[in-house]
Amino acid sequence: GAGVSQSPRYKVAKRGQDVALRCDPISGHVSLFWYQQALGQGPEFLTYFQNEAQLDKSGLPSDRFFAERPEGSVSTLKIQRTQQEDSAVYLCASSPQGEAYEQYFGPGTRLTVT
Amino acid sequence: AQSVTQLGSHVSVSEGALVLLRCNYSSSVPPYLFWYVQYPNQGLQLLLKYTSAATLVKGINGFEAEFKKSETSFHLTKPSAHMSDAAEYFCAVTPRGGYQKVTFGIGTKLQVIP
């Protein structure tokens, strides 16, 4: 079956622009996670959804970052007024109900802020 | 707080040689532990996970890892390296019980020399 997909795969934004990154999880997966992976680092947790409820957003680095999953399926991570330090790969992962510890990752969106 | 430490950001082995990637965890109680692999421009793929009493865990592509509570370690091994094993490997940890954030190590880049 289809895995987790993310779009766009690459995004170049000028500093100050807003961006929206999309994640399509595996069909039926209840849990959805966003991570930020800086160059040469491991993924860092941003936020977690269970269905449409955002249960943990403690990893969002600033109020410029906003995530939503309005119908409990597709999720969008929005970054307002992008800064150079936002340049990273943004990874989305999903997991089925009851298996929240096993996550299936998408290929990521590489964001470059110039 | 939970954490993992991966010793060696770069490891080189000859094709056919033993692969050993080190991971030590810090957690007040035995956690769930994972190894993920990331190929260039791809998302993370689960190699194996420790979630039960069986301390020797076998994963995909001939990898295995042993949970050693006394050493707080979860090292990843493979008896014979293949060229296709060249990738970045991440150790990750999450506490037991319900949803918990997954914390990743910084990764170890494995180079396989022909």
Image: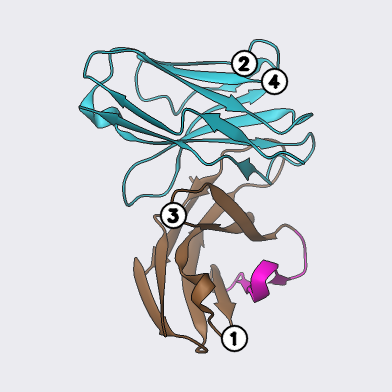
Q: Which residue is mark 4?
A: A73
Residue under disc 4 on the same chain as residue under disc 1:
no
Determine the residue positioned at 32% across, 52% down. Answer: A40
Magenta residue span: B52-70
Amino acid bearing label 2:
Arg
- Residue A2 location in percent, x, y? 72, 38
Determine the residue positioned at 29% across, 33% down. Answer: A87
- Residue A97 location in percent, x, y? 79, 34
State the hue of chain A: cyan
Identify the chain drawn in brown.
Answer: B
Residue B27 visible to the viewer: no
Q: Which mark is residue B40?
A: 3
Q: Which residue is mark 1?
A: B79
Q: Which residue is mark 2?
A: A69
Q: Report, in whole angstroms, how far the alpha carbon at label 3 lies from the one at label 2.
A: 28 Å
Chain ID of residue with mark 3? B
Circle 3: element type: loop
Do callouts 1 and 3 mark residues in contact (Cβ within 8 Å)? no
Chain ID of residue with mark 4? A
Q: Residues within 10 Å of mark 1 (few under 14, many from 20)?
A: few
Q: Is residue A89 above or below residue A11?
A: below
Circle 2: element type: loop
Amino acid bearing label 3:
Pro
